[in-house]
Amino acid sequence: MNDVSINGLWLSTINAQLVSRDIPPLPDTEENTVKLAGRDGVKSFGSTYAARPLGLGLFVMGDDYDGTVAKLASVFNVRRGPLIIIFDDRPEKRYIAEYRGSMAFDTSTGNRLINVPLKMDDPWPESQQDTELREYGQGLSFGEGYFYISDSSFSITTSGQMVTLDNIGSERAYPLMRISGSFTDLSISDGRQTFTFTGSIGANDVLEIDSDPDKCTVKLNGTNAWGRSNGVFFELIPGETTFTVSATTPAFNLEIIYRYKYLF
């Protein structure tokens, strides 16, 4: 652990060295309870996780102290919105956080140690790469961490076809399902719930079902098609999930796109 990247900028390139980080193994929990009149104690509706704090300790190197501090202020400026943070010793994960609080300076080190407080509103780190299939000729090179043979892309040619994917993360993920090709009256089931889409689409059409809780959209060729669906969306628990895909005369590619999410 010697360096950290913020939105693609390694801080060592502006003379700031990462000397410490503070990432709790789990976020704090928040209890959801209701006090009922005439009843001892409370009624519990379970617990959820709060935002996760993340702290960076940076040592300012070189002779231009003020210049480096000014660059750090620009890097962590809250007006930039959420920052993508990658540590050099955890290159497979990224942390999405924003500057929260105020930078603290440690005068015992000659005022060169700066502590930067951050907070992850979505508390789960995620994989740098999502599961979207990428191929040569798209500006990519072998060894860059891309999936050239995706285990999340399936050719569907038979009604009732079953496909299995493996969420190797340790937390739930909410996928984007992209369907390219033709079918009539589609259903997709994970054994717990079933998504349906009525009517036909053609060979050049693209249907996207986005299960992100902040979106929950159904779009056909980029246009809202919610009314043709039953409004069911999927979550992928850690481990394998098997989907059963049924339709009349299916001839399409099903791509299930998501990032692995991790508890720590």
Image (cartoon, grey):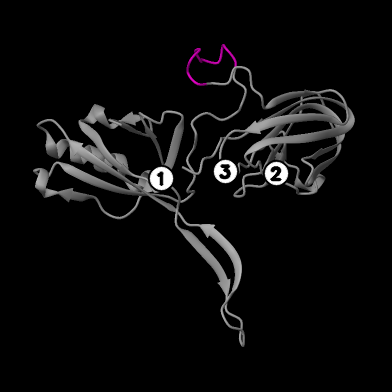
Residue 119 horizontal/vertical position (percent): 39, 50
Residue 157, compared with residue 49, is above or below; it is above
Q: CA distance from mark 2 to mark 3?
A: 14 Å
Q: Earlier in the sequence, mark 1 or mark 2?
A: 1
Q: Amino acid at mark 2?
A: Phe
Q: Which residue is mark 1?
A: 97
Q: CA distance from mark 1 to mark 2?
A: 25 Å
Task: Write down the region rendered in magenta.
Answer: 135-145
Q: Is residue 52 left or right of residue 247?
A: left
Q: Earlier in the sequence, mark 3 or mark 1?
A: 1
Q: Quadrant of residue 7?
A: top left
Q: Mark 2 or 3, which is nearer the eye?
A: 3
Which element is circle 3 on? Answer: loop
Residue 195, compared with residue 143, is above or below; it is below
Which element is circle 1 on? Answer: strand
Residue at 77% x, 35% y: name it. 243
Which element is circle 2 on? Answer: loop
Q: Is residue 69 left or right of residue 230?
A: left
Label placed on residue 171: 3
Farthest residue, direction front = 40
